């Protein structure tokens, strides 16, 4: 047997070995290096470019910034961007909710295929989305010509095309935020409501929807934030017609190309502000859901 | 058993309701997603298989596709390392302004690609703040591949981080402590204990980043500006082909890019479901 008097008790020995390592985690350590690396990455990639553009937009003062934003063509582009995004968000909220509900609660042939199709817009580049819509609804195409001449409904180079493109791109956002919540939803409450004589629609409105309201809201906000800046699909579908189909992002492109730096920076800052505000608000909504 | 009865009652109660909802959703998906996709396929085939295959074998297309692929691979490598580190820092570290930091990560997701390209132009362009330095070293960033690379890096930034955060949150820390107790070095702990838990999410993050990188257009258009031919990515190739009214070429390239992206993401989906 080995002498035990020299060896300290096992837990003490353990602490001697592990203790210093646990302590270094808080002080100087590779962990600190990781944090610095991450900060530098985000600083260089996101923060500095945003500061540069902010500084550029206000370099002639706030009045000049406001002048650029309130020019009729710029203001009209911003308004068009906001209302098409808002309309898309409303449709997306309703259809996303319905799609998530159908995928979770009902069994039908082709359900797995439908579930797979939902993700396609995430993978398809937005430029390709724009090309697809122009082929389908373009004025030279069968369907597009029919809609334009018989019904007088223009899709391409007009706001409906913008809304359609935005709907395609953001379709998965609402569905995929609601789906996991609906899957985890306790059905006992619905059963209780059914026992008490509530009917399908009442159960949905009073029991199911309140639980889905927050995910629906956060998914919708996310799609709105994404839509406001959308460019690839919109520039193909809507073209670049001032006061009619020119969105804010396309306006910025025009300003960059004509070297109108003040206009480009000013409208860029408006787009940045909208996206940032919506994202921070969405994160807050999500944090509240986790807290609840 | 009672629940079965209630469910049966509810199903009966629902009557036509469920069927109407299911059919509405299917019709909506067909109208919104499937119709445009089939339009693209028929558009590419408007001059038949010969026209399609001629467009598919254009050297310019494959040159641009190769460049897109190279840029995407480089971007994925950087995001794989720095994105994972950033996700780690967000989950495991506590510091002031962490929620703001967390919000900043999402900016590229919502920021207009045109603005992204323009920001880079303000920094690296002819009148940009970095211009003296670039001139001194004779580097070209704007209207060249490095600019396109930076733009792609920016727009694809959140994907890896967002994929990694929940996985790192769910890691079992007692295993790391156990490895630590057994005398494993940090490096060994990372490779033997932490990394295996991250692998699936890493694949998925790589796929999403890759798809986003291959498909980036707006930022690349602004910062890549006048470049044509040799330094054109696939999306720029499609845009130029459309402008020159070479529709079959444009549609064929769009199909190639679309199928490529969908394949990458489906492969990652498959890996995720298998494990």
Image (cartoon, rainbow, N blue to C red):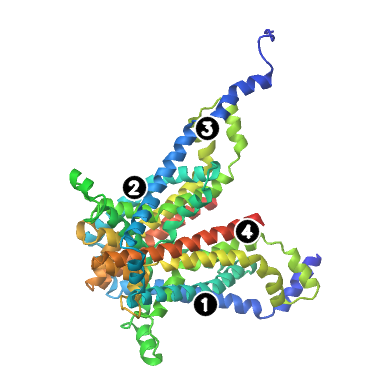
Q: Can residue B170 be seen in the rendering of this structure?
A: yes
Residue A179: percent from the left, percent from the top? 59, 63
Residue nearest the viewer, comparing A218 with B44: A218
Compared with A61, A38 (above or below) is above
**Local secondary structure at mark 1:** helix
Q: Which residue is mark 4?
A: A289
**Nearer the viewer's eye, disc 2 or disc 4?**
4
Q: Position of residue B149 (x, y in %)?
A: 31, 52
Q: Nearer the viewer, mark 1 or mark 3?
A: 3
Residue B38 located left or right of residue A176: left
Q: Chain of mark 2?
A: B
Task: Say few, some or many: other residues with alpha carbon within 10 Å of mark 4 (under 14 / 14 to 19 / 20 or more).
Answer: few
Please report contact status of discs 4 and 1: CB closer than 8 Å, yes or no: no
Residue A173, x across and y down, in percent? 51, 64
Q: Is residue B268 left or right of residue A65?
A: right
- The answer to whether marks 2 and 3 sit on the same chain is yes
Nearer the observer, disc 4 or disc 1? Answer: 4
Chain assignment, label 4: A
Q: Which residue is mark 1?
A: B27
Q: In the displayed structure, does residue A284 sit left or right of residue A253? A: right
Give the Cα distance between marks 4 and 3.
34 Å
Q: Which mark is residue B74?
A: 2
Residue wearing tag 3 = B189
* Circles 1 and 3 on the same chain: yes
Disc 2 to disc 1, how far (Cα)?
A: 40 Å
| Nearer-N-terminus badge (2/3) | 2
Task: Say which of marks 2 and 1 sits in front.
Answer: 2
Q: Reply above or below: B174 against B59.
A: above
Rendered location of residue A77, percent (x, y): 37, 75
- Name the chain letter of the residue that bears numbered label 3: B
């Amino acid at each position: 047997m080995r002498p035990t008097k020299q060896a300290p008790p096992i837990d003490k020995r353990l602490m001697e070995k592990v203790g210093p390592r646990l302590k270094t985690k808080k002080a100087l350590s590779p962990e600190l290096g990781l944090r610095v690396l991450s900060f530098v990455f985000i600083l260089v990639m996101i923060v500095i470019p945003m500061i540069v553009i902010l500084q550029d937009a206000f370099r002639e003062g706030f009045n000049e910034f406001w002048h650029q934003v309130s020019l009729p063509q710029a203001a009209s582009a911003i308004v068009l961007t906001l209302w098409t995004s808002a309309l898309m968000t409303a449709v997306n909220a309703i259809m996303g909710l319905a799609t998530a509900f159908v995928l979770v609660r009902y069994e039908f042939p082709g359900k797995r295929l439908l579930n797979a199709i939902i993700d396609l817009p995430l993978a398809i580049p937005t430029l390709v989305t724009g090309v697809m819509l122009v082929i389908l609804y373009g004025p030279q195409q069968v369907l597009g010509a029919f809609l334009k001449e018989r019904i007088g409904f223009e899709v391409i180079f007009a706001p409906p095309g913008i809304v359609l493109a935005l709907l395609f791109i953001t379709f998965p956002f609402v569905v995929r935020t609601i789906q996991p919540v609906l899957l985890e939803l306790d059905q006992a409450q619905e059963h209780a409501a059914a026992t008490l004589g509530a009917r399908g629609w009442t159960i949905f409105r009073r029991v199911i929807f309140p639980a889905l309201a927050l995910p629906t809201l956060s998914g919708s906000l996310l799609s709105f934030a994404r839509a406001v800046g959308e460019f690839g699909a919109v520039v193909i579908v809507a073209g670049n017609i001032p006061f009619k189909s020119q969105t804010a992002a396309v306006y910025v492109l025009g300003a960059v190309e004509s070297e109108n730096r003040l206009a480009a920076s000013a409208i860029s800052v408006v787009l940045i502000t909208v996206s940032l505000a919506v994202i921070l608000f969405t994160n807050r909504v999500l944090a509240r859901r986790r807290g609840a | 058993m009672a629940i079965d009865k209630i469910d049966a009652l509810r199903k009966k109660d629902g009557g036509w309701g469920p069927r109407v909802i299911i059919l509405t959703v299917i019709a909506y998906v067909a109208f919104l997603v499937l119709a445009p996709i089939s339009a693209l396929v028929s558009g590419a085939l408007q001059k038949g298989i010969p026209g399609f295959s001629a467009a598919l074998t254009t050297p310019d297309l494959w040159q641009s596709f190769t460049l897109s692929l190279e840029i995407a691979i480089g971007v994925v490598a950087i995001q794989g390392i720095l994105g994972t580190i950033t996700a780690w820092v967000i989950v495991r570290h506590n510091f002031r302004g962490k929620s703001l930091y967390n919000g900043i990560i999402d900016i590229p997701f919502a920021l207009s690609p045109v603005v992204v390209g323009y920001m880079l132009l303000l920094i690296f362009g002819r009148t940009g703040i970095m211009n003296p330095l670039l001139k001194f070293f004779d580097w070209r960033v704007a209207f060249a591949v490095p600019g396109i690379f930076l733009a792609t890096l920016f727009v694809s930034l959140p994907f890896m981080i967002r994929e990694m955060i929940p996985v790192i949150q769910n890691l079992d820390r007692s295993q790391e402590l156990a490895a630590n107790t057994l005398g494993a070095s940090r490096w060994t702990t990372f490779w033997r204990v932490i990394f295996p838990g991250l692998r699936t999410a890493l694949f998925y993050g790589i796929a999403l980043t890759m798809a986003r990188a291959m498909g980036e257009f707006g930022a690349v258009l602004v910062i890549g500006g006048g470049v044509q031919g040799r330094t054109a990515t696939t999306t720029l190739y499609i845009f130029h082909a459309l402008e020159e009214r070479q529709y079959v070429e444009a549609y064929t390239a769009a199909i190639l890019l679309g199928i490529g992206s969908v394949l990458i993401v489906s492969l990652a989906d498959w890996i995720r479901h298998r494990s």
